[in-house]
Amino acid sequence: MQTVESLVDLRNTVHTWKQAGQSVALVPTMGNLHEGHLRLVDFAHTRADRVMVSIFVNPLQFGQGEDFDRYPRTGEEDARQLVSRQADLLYLPTVDVMYPRDAGQMTRVSVPGLSGRYCGQSRPGHFDGVATVVCKLLNQAQPDIAVFGEKDYQQLMIIQRLVADLDIPVKIAGVPTVREADGLAMSSRNGYLDQAEREQAPALYQTLQQLASDCSNEPPNFRALEKEGANLLEQAGFRTDYVAICRKQDLEPATDRDHDLVILCAAYLGKTRLIDNINVTVDQHA
């Protein structure tokens, strides 16, 4: 596996691959890799001849008082795992490479509407930071396909909107959430949980499963179900941020005329904020 830090080296390598007629996939990450990330690499291998992974802890997507400074940096282990999954290239840009001028004075990318609700409401500016860094990575690497996990479904939707609106010639692929044996969605932030919190954490997905089952009731009352979900989380020891039952295609609040849904939630265990989602299809109601 080749490792590069400079934009020139990245582009030279990608140019060589494309000159040889090879397709290229990009898997953007913030490192501290786990099996969920590695499944993205596996998927990328099925869609492209060459697979590159970027690791960059992006300061623009962390708000004041969030965990930028303590976010786990596990570079050597990350590289070892990527070699085991046969990644072709690891891109490790520095902050100076990504933001050569003061980041506060550089162009930002914003996806209105989608970015301001749910996680965006709780973390103002977060998705502007995500959209900006993803736009830069796509322009730097110029892949044929970029692969993201569905655990952050709102982020995936924002990236798909970004690519469509800005006519960026790349396909965005989502890969289903990878879970621990007890149902907890794999996440780099799971490592913040103490033993007691880790034992409580699967209740997040269990609550989503309960809500998905309840959505089949007729007539569905999605707003009441959202309140029910929040109450269930509170009873399980969480501090609920939000529970939202949405239309899958655009994340607008679901109505009884919708049947392809996604249930989004975010909640705190102690100081750790966890997110998850579940797809549900319900019968259309007259």
Image (tube, rainbow, N blue to C red):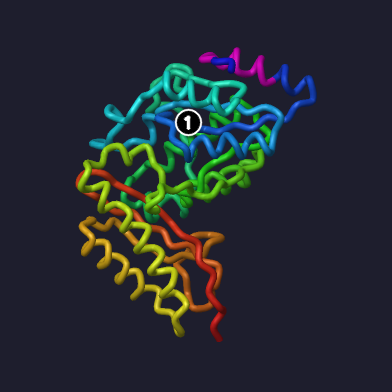
Residue 60 placement (x, y as % from top left)? 38, 32
Viewer-side residue, 155 vs 101: 155
Q: Main secondary structure of the magenta part?
A: helix
Q: Is residue 7 magenta?
A: yes
- Examine the rendered structure and indicate whether residue 187 appears above or below residue 246: above
In the image, farthest residue toward the front:
181
- What crowding class fits label 1: few (fewer than 14 Cα within 10 Å), some (14-19), or many (20 or more)? few
Considering the image in quadrants, where does the N terminus appear?
Answer: top right
Residue 271 placement (x, y as % from top left)? 21, 44
Viewer-side residue, 179 vs 18: 179
Residue 62 is left or right of residue 168, and the answer is left
- Total numbered badges shown on the rendered structure: 1
Query: What residue is shown at x 46% (from left), y 51% (from top)?
Result: 154
In the image, farthest residue toward the bottom:
286
Considering the image in quadrants, where does the C terminus appear?
Answer: bottom right
Range drawn in magenta:
4-14
Q: Is residue 261 magenta?
A: no
Q: Which residue is mark 1?
A: 107
Query: What residue is shown at x 33% (from left), y 57% (from top)?
Result: 204
